[in-house]
Image (tube, helix red, strand yellow):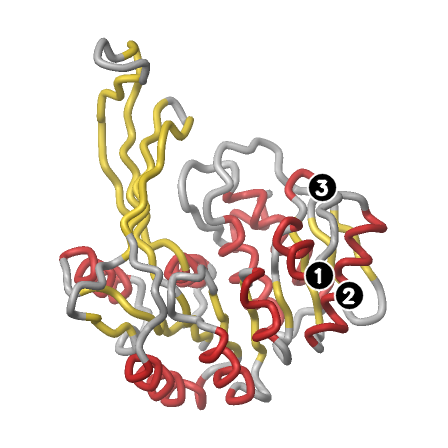
Amino acid sequence: MIVVIGDIIVDEFILGDVSRISPEAPVPVVHVEKVERRLGGSANVIRNLHALKQSSAMIGVVGDDEPGTWVHTRLAELDSAHEGVLIKKNGRPTAIKTRVIARHQQVVRFDKEWATPLQKDMHTNLLEHLKNKLTDAKAVILSDYAKGVLTPEFLTQLIPLLAGKIIAVDPKPEHTDAYKGATFITPNLHEAAAMADMDSINDDKHVEAIARKLHHKLNLTYTLITRSERGMTLFDGKLCHHIPTAARDVFDVTGAGDTVIAVFTTCLSRGDSPLLAAQTANKAAGVVVSKVGTATASWQEIKDF
C-alpha cells in the first residue's frame, strides 16, 4: 500500500466551444457541452495509483458539503481507503478549481478554497489515521499544495514518524526546510530553483547544481526535478541523469506532477532502480500531457508510449 496525505482538491471542467465574443464585454462566449469532475490535488495522486493497480489510502480534509461527499464516494469507487479523509465543519469548504475549456484551450480558471492552516486537533486526528496505516504501507507520499494540511509544523512531526518508509514529497518552496529527511522530492524547475535560492535556468549544468544543493540541504536520497520540454533530471546521490522529454503532443500539463510522483514512488516501492523509475515516470508524464485535464497513465499506456 501507498499512503497519500495532503491537500484534496476537486477539479471541475466546463467543456464547450466558442464561436463569438460577448456583446457585454470583450470576452468569449462558451457554449457549454458538458461538465466533468475529477479528483484533484493530492487526491489526483490516488487516481494515478489506481491506474497503476497500486493499492492506496488517502488522508486529508474535505468540507461538510456536497463536493466533500463526492470525494468520499469517488475514493470508494477507486478502492482507496478513505477513513482518514476528515470532514471539516464550521465553514471550511472542499477546495474546488473550476476550469473553462473551449477547443482544448483553457479560457479561465476560478478557485474556491480556504488555505488557512488546519487547527491542531485536526492535525492530531490525521496523524492517528496515518499511524493506523503505516504497518501496511511501503511508501508515503506527502502531496503539498499549500492549502493548510501539510504545514511546516505538521511536516516536522510526520517525517521522523515515517522513518524506514519511502517518503516522497511533491513540495512547495515556502515549506522547504520542513522536508528534511524525506527520501526524495519531485519539484518542477521553478520550484526547485526557489527552494535552492538559485536562478531558474533550464540548463543541464545549472539544474545539476540545483539538484546537488537540495540533496545536501535536505538530506535526501534522490532528487527528481521536472523540466518541462527538457524532460527531467535525477540526482541519485552520486550521479546526475538528464532524461529527455518523452512528450510528443502537449495539450494540458494539469496534474502531470501528480503522475510523476505516483509512478516514481510505485516503481521504487516494487524494487526498480531510481533511474528506471525516473525513466518510467517520464514516459507516464508524456502520456498524461497528451490528454486534456487531470489525467492518468496505465502500465499499458506507458508501455505503448
Instruction: Report x, y in % for residue 168.
Output: 56, 71
Label 2 Cα crowd, 10 Å radius (few <14 / some 14-19 / many 20+): some
Q: Position of residue 148 (x, y in %)?
A: 38, 67
The one nearer the camera, 69 or 51, is: 69
Side of 260 where 36 appears, left or right: left
Classify residue 104 as left or right of residue 29: right
> In the rendered structure, are the residues bearing label 1 and label 2 in contact, judged by CB atoms less than 8 Å apart?
yes
Mark 3 vs mark 1, CA separation in Å: 19 Å
The residue labelled by disc 1 is: 196
Residue 72 horizontal side relative to residue 180, left or right:
left
Judging depth in this view, the residue of 117 and 81 nearest the camera is 117
Q: Amino acid at mark 3?
A: Arg
Q: Position of residue 238 (x, y in %)?
A: 84, 70
Helix, strand or loop at mark 3: helix
Q: Which residue is mark 2?
A: 213
Counting from the top left corner in percent of width and height, residue 177 is at: 61, 73
User: What mark, if any, has residue 236 been given in the picture?
Assistant: none
Q: Residue at x 45, y 77 (%)?
A: 1
**Amino acid type assigned to the residue bearing label 1 in the image:** Ala
Measured in 3D between alpha carbons, the distance from the residue under mark 2 to the one under mark 3, in whole angstroms, is 20 Å
Label 2 sits on what residue type?
Lys
Q: Earlier in the sequence, mark 1 or mark 2?
A: 1
Q: Is residue 64 left or right of residue 160?
A: left
Mark 3 highlights which residue? 230
Residue at the image position 68 percent from the left and 74 percent from the top: 218
SS of the residue at dot 2? helix
Query: Which quadrant, please, contains the C terminus?
Result: top right
Query: Is 30 rendered above or below residue 20?
Result: below
